[in-house]
Image (tube, rainbow, N blue to C red):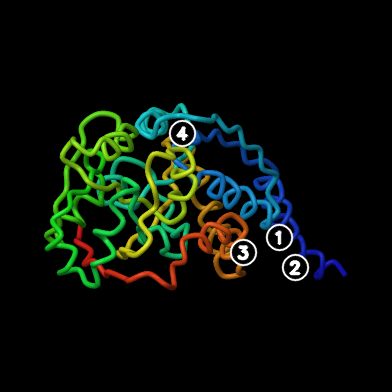
Amino acid sequence: MSVLRLVLLPCLIMLLSRTVMAEKVELMIGLTTSGGGHYFVDLLEQSLKAQGYDVSLRVIEELPQSRVVYMVTHGDLSLTWLLQTKERDESLVPVHVGLTNGLIGHRVLLIPPEAQSLYDQVNSLADFRTLGKVGVFGKDWFDVKVWKYNQLKYFEREGSWEKAYKQVASGNRGVDYFSRGIFEVVEEADQHPYLKIEEHLLFVYDRDFLFYLSSSAAHYKQIIEESLIAARDSGLMQALINKHWETSFDRLALDKRVRLNLNTPSD
């Protein structure tokens, strides 16, 4: 019996140690004014809980994205979710597990309501180039690199990108559409009823969102990564995608759109 105890004791110590470490995960998160953020909070919380962690999340609502990134960089927030880029990987602490099964690279356009007939004529990327419409993006967005790499016209907006909606709606500011992810566009269209979701096209490039941690929350990287991998492999991630966006996907009628595959530049 004493031998058995000697064998089991290290295992018991490891199990108890894991339980102690997993007892509490405390994170402060900022929700941006763009749509879709509740999915990422839910994914984080449910993934950690599924692995037995006691999760405490404090969520601050309605922050501009630039403010959220600033606060994560300076340790005032624990993490955020951003499209993966080399620059972000170097300036923040990345958790290298895609958060949307690649769906964040599926983009549709917000356009003025009267413009739909112009886009109905497009059946290829060459057609879209010929159309000559100009997309608006925030400063240094990865989408800018994608549009440039694929020889599409774009305007890179300085300052607050949230003003892009009205810039497109005005019709006289030199931009024609705002490319948005399929996770966020339905909520944003409802928030900005002077624009409509373009009905015919689906732009696709290869990229995903990652969680990026502040340096003060970097010690959570391993457990978040392990929890997300388990969520992806178990189907929990896909179940949460369906929970949050199945209705939106139905409204977008993605399977009926013309798919325009975009080449993805390296960082």
Identify residue for label 4: 216
Pick whichever, 151 or 87, lies toward us.
Answer: 151
Say whether marks 1 and 2 touch (CB < 8 Å).
yes
The answer to whether residue 256 is above or below residue 213 is: below
Crowd class of label 1 (few under 14; some 14 to 19; many from 20; radius 10 Å) = few
Q: Residues within 10 Å of mark 4 (few under 14, many from 20)?
A: some
| Residue 249: mark in rendering | none
- Disc count in the image? 4
Q: Secondary structure at mark 2?
A: helix
Mark sitting on residue 10 = 1
Q: Nearer the viewer, residue 243 or 267?
A: 243
Residue at numbered disc 3: 239
Please give the name of the residue rendered at 34% of the width and 64% of the height, measured from the top-left corner: 200
Left or right of residue 61, residue 105 in this image: left
Residue 4 point in image, percent of width and height:
81, 70
The N terminus - image quarter:
bottom right
The quadrant of the image that shows the C terminus is bottom left
The percent position of residue 211, horizontal first and vertical second, equals 45, 48
Q: Earlier in the sequence, mark 1 or mark 4?
A: 1
- Relative to 216, residue 199 above or below: below
Please tell me whether mark 4 sits on a helix, a strand or a loop. helix
Residue 135: image location, x then y, percent? 22, 48
Q: Earlier in the sequence, mark 3 or mark 2?
A: 2
Spatial separation of the CA atoms under disc 3 and disc 4: 31 Å
- Amino acid type of the residue that numbered disc 2 sits on in the rendered structure: Val
